[in-house]
Amino acid sequence: MNYSRSLVNLTEDEIRYFSRKVENMLNKLYEDSDVILMTAPNEDVLKNIILEILVERPMNLKEIHAVLSGLASEDKIRKALLSLTDGGKIHADEVGKFRILGSIK
């Protein structure tokens, strides 16, 4: 992954941690030592995944996309973030990081 470090303030270990967390939330269709085949998240599942990530750490769009790379496009993530914002579940702070509404982390 080659994201600009100014936009993604996550270490490779953090990206792996959150990616594994997301992986455990998805339905695995097949797994062996080389390949894991999972169903892509629908819009509701994607929103739940984003909420679970944001409970642990506020993130901007690029950070969320770095974690969900290969599972959801930036446009789908943006749509889910807008829906969660409009639904009053999250908000973007002054530096563009999304947070669970009421969170002070």
Image: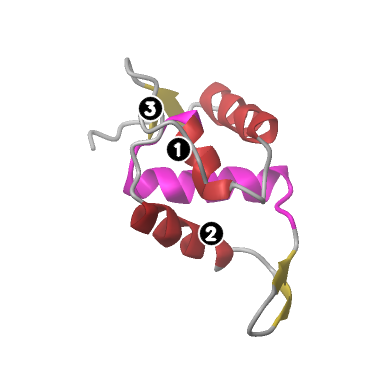
Q: CA distance from mark 2 to mark 1?
A: 14 Å
Quarter placement of the C terminus = top left
* Identity, as a three-letter code, of the amino acid under mark 1: Glu
Q: Report the number of numbered marks.
A: 3
Most extreme residue toward the bottom is: 33
Mark 1 or mark 3, whichever is nearer to me? 1
Q: Is residue 56 magenta?
A: yes
Q: Position of residue 60 (x, y in %)?
A: 43, 30
Q: Which residue is mark 3?
A: 97
| Local secondary structure at mark 1 | helix
Whichever of callouts 3 and 2 sits on the residue coming sooner in the sequence is 2
Q: Position of residue 77 (x, y in %)?
A: 62, 35
* Identity, as a three-letter code, of the amino acid under mark 3: Lys
In the image, which residues are magenta?
40-61
Residue beneath the point at 49% across and 32% down: 62
Q: Which residue is mark 1?
A: 63
Residue beneath the point at 42% across and 53% down: 15
